[in-house]
Image: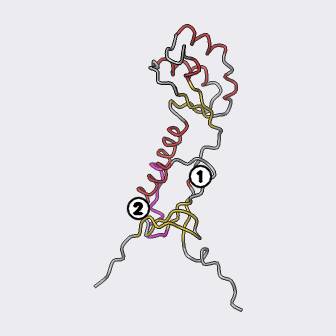
Amino acid sequence: MEPLVNRVASSGLITLNLEDYYPKQEIATFDLKDFLFMEMILKEKDFRAALKEYDWTQYEGKILTVFCSADAIIPVWAYMLVATYAEPFATDIFQGTQEEYLKAVYRGILIDMDLSQYEGKRIVIKGCSNKPVPPAAYLALTTKLRPFAQSIMYGEPCSTVPIFKRPRVVKK
């Protein structure tokens, strides 16, 4: 009987997992809709009073995304006021939704990544994430990896979807 061989381990595939770069802190949301009169109008005096009474300690050590889910015109100063109250507690404050925040975080990480170490390598970008890694991160990683990688696949090393393969150069 022949010994079992782990073909995945001996294949030379390198797995990149975008989930490894997911923020460690919890992401909390602050929806300005809850502070609008009839979900349409921001009244400055009422808004200031509500912010003053609000329990900001719930954002201690968390990332806070600030947005408005209602179709209302929100003055810029409203976001600024929220920031002044949240800043002593939140580790980061972002104007936008959680998805927009994650897109911005991954964009920043990928811009700074040096992927030249993957020159000529066969790469698997791991799928089946347990965290909501935005599709934009996969797109950006593929775009940045393409000039270096011999091939790019998506999924798990045992079951991948081919994304890119560099054509072989025929020497004459």
Residue 166, label in figure: none
Identify the residue at image location x=31%, y=82%: 171
**How many numbered markers are drawn?**
2
The quarter of the displayed image where residue 7 is located: bottom right
The one of 35 and 65 positioned closer to us in this rendering? 35
- The x, y position of residue 118, in whole percent, is 47, 65
For this orientation, the residue located farthest to the bottom is 1
For this orientation, the residue located farthest to the top is 45
Q: Is residue 111 magenta?
A: yes
Identify the residue position indicated by label 2 in the image. Answer: 146
Q: Is residue 79 magenta?
A: no
130, above or below 155, in the image: above
Q: Which residues are magenta?
A: 110-122
74, above or below 45, in the image: below
For this orientation, the residue located farthest to the right is 1
Q: Amino acid at mark 1?
A: Glu
Identify the residue at image location x=59%, y=52%: 19
The one of 49 and 38 positioned closer to us in this rendering? 38
Identify the residue at image location x=71%, y=92%: 1
157, above or below 6, in the image: above
Check if mark 1's residue and mark 2's residue have beta carbons within 8 Å. no
Identify the residue position indicated by label 1 in the image. Answer: 19
Q: Amino acid at mark 2?
A: Arg
Identify the residue at image location x=46%, y=21%: 72
